[in-house]
Image (cartoon, rainbow, N blue to C red):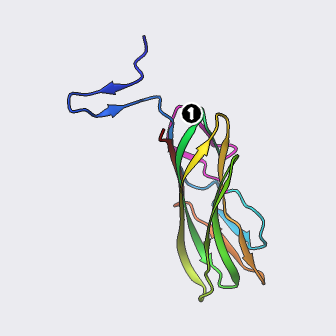
């Protein structure tokens, strides 16, 4: 008796229970993230929407409700970018695979930059996905993760 899918007269299909989320903000912000290679979980704590309630704002984790292919996108707005880092990377870490985007940034210090990563990930029911921001350096570089960051995803098929 519950409506799960609607097709209007123009052929638009909406599925109000289809897994989809968009979270933003960063709990904090996360300042002075050290560049020692440690995986630092990005703490997205503010839901813009979360159809099906699959994102947990206290653990910063998306949990796949069913087995399928999920489109995931993460963006991190970084303040106080330090040129002492050998490189920066942004990761989407899932139960099945870690997806990594590496940025070789060795120019002068800058005030801000945005890092992004997209992936179509295969996930089984109850697999999880988080975003992490590790950096590598040969000195004492550190960065600030700004609140204008977000993580989103949805079940594709």
Which residue occupies the foreground of this view, 103 or 49? 103
Can residue 1 be seen here? The reply is yes
Q: Is residue 24 above or below residue 139?
A: above
Looking at the image, residue 3 sits to the left or right of residue 100; the answer is left
Looking at the image, residue 138 sits to the left or right of residue 117; the answer is right
Residue found at the very far left of the displayed protein:
9
Q: Position of residue 19 (x, y in %)?
A: 51, 35
Q: Position of residue 8 (x, y in %)?
A: 25, 28
Q: Residue shown at 62%/71% (left/top)?
A: 102
**The magenta stretch spans residue 53:** yes
Q: Residue shown at 58%/49% (left/top)?
A: 121
Q: Position of residue 14 (x, y in %)?
A: 36, 32
What number of labels is visible? 1
Local crowd size for mark 1, using a 10 Å CA cut-off: few (<14), some (14–19), many (≥20): some
Which residue occupies the foreground of this view, 68 or 131? 68
Q: Which residues are magenta?
A: 42-60
Which residue occupies the foreground of this view, 141 or 1? 1
Looking at the image, residue 87 sits to the left or right of residue 12; the answer is right
Can residue 22 be seen here? The reply is no
SS label for mark 1: loop
Q: Residue shown at 70%/85% (left/top)?
A: 84
The image quadrant that residue 91 belongs to is: bottom right
**The magenta stretch spans residue 27:** no
Residue found at the very far top of the displayed protein:
1
For the N terminus, which image quadrant? top left
Q: Which residue is mark 1?
A: 53
Q: Residue shown at 79%/72% (left/top)?
A: 36
Q: Position of residue 108 (x, y in %)?
A: 59, 89
């Amino acid at each position: 008796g519950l409506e799960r899918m609607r097709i209007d007269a123009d052929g638009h299909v909406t599925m109000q229970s289809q897994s989809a989320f968009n979270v933003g903000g960063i709990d904090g912000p996360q300042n002075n993230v050290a560049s020692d290679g440690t995986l630092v979980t990005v703490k997205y704590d503010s839901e813009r929407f979360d159809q099906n309630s699959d994102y947990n704002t206290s653990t910063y984790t998306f949990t796949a409700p069913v087995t399928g292919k999920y489109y995931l996108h993460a963006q991190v707005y970084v303040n106080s970018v330090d040129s002492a880092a050998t490189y920066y990377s942004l990761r989407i870490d899932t139960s099945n695979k870690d997806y990594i985007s590496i940025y070789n940034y060795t120019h002068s210090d800058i005030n801000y930059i945005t890092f992004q990563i997209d992936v179509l990930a295969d996930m089984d029911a109850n697999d999880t996905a988080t975003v992490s921001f590790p950096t590598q350096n040969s000195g004492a570089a550190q960065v600030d993760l700004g609140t204008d960051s977000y993580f989103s995803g949805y079940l594709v098929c």
